[in-house]
Amino acid sequence: MSSKGKVRGGQQSHLSLIETMRWEPETGFARLDQHLRRLKRSADALGFLAAPADLVKQLEEATNGAEAALRVRLEMSFRGKLTITTTPFVPLAEDTVWRIAIARARMDSSDPMYRHKTTRRDLYEAARAEFAADEADEVLLLNERDELCEGTITNIFVEDMDGGLATPAISSGLLAGILRGDMIRNGRAKSALLKPADLAGRTIYVGNSLRGLIRAELLPA
């Protein structure tokens, strides 16, 4: 990994890894194994200390006694310290359609840090700030080659010519979301190089492990 992808000097004191999961009383954590595998891969790649051996126990304790669905945010520091917070989770209505827009801010496809879910969120926050919350529900990012990458909190899925779904390739520079990985493994989606023109006249979805797939419509430029 290039020096861009390593945690150096004072960075280690504030950079943390993040996993955001859905928990439900009847089924427990959604895709827990995938979230924990991603956490370990990122910790290994960035030189973090390993997660505590009782990580799963701590997650279970955080949800103990809950009677309704929760959004569970796991944050792990460079030294392996965990912070777990829970908030009520209310699923979106099935007929929800998000309005999406494309940011002027660009991702650097050569920066491997974007392949890890961390508290380094400046670019995503800048892209989100380009549009008011009542104007767009999600904002998409392009890279320096005008390829679609991801949303600020979601991956992108576009209906292809065969009726399946295409999602931007890792080489474009993006976080490989847990839902995205599941859909590729299950044959529901395939990776491809996509540009804004590929959104025209096609069914679009955005999604993540917490909320699942959400229908989306691109706002006029």
Image (cartoon, grey):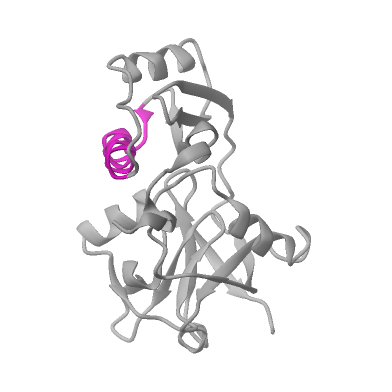
**Residue at x-position 73% and y-position 60%:** 129
Q: Position of residue 73 (x, y in %)?
A: 51, 31
Name the image quarter holding residue 31. top left
Frontmost residue, 186 versus 43: 43
Q: Position of residue 159 (x, y in %)?
A: 39, 77
**Residue 156 included in the magenta stretch of the image:** no
Residue 29 in percent (x, y) is at 37, 30
Number of dots carrying numbers? 0
Image quarter in which the C terminus is found: bottom right
Q: Given the current orientation, which residue lies at the most extreme front position?
A: 9
Q: Is residue 41 left or right of residue 97?
A: left
Residue appearing at x 75%, y 58% in the figure: 133
Specify start and end residues of the magenta stretch as a single range: 27-45
Would you say 91 lies left or right of 9 here?
Answer: right
Image quarter (top left, top right, bottom left or bottom right) of the N terminus: bottom left
Q: Is residue 176 visible?
A: no
Note whether 67 is above or below 6 in the view shown: above
Chief secondary structure of the magenta span? helix
Tell me what residue is drawn at x 26 percent, y 35 percent: 33
**Which residue is found at the position 70% from the left and 65% from the top?**
136
Is residue 93 in view?
Answer: yes
User: Horizontal and vertical percent for residue 74?
Assistant: 47, 30
Q: Is residue 41 magenta?
A: yes
Residue 47 as seen in the image, left or right of residue 214: left
Q: Is residue 168 left or right of residue 53?
A: right
Q: Is residue 61 above or below residue 118?
A: above
Q: Nearer the viewer, residue 95 or 107?
A: 107
Q: Relative to residue 44, is residue 29 depicted above or below? A: above
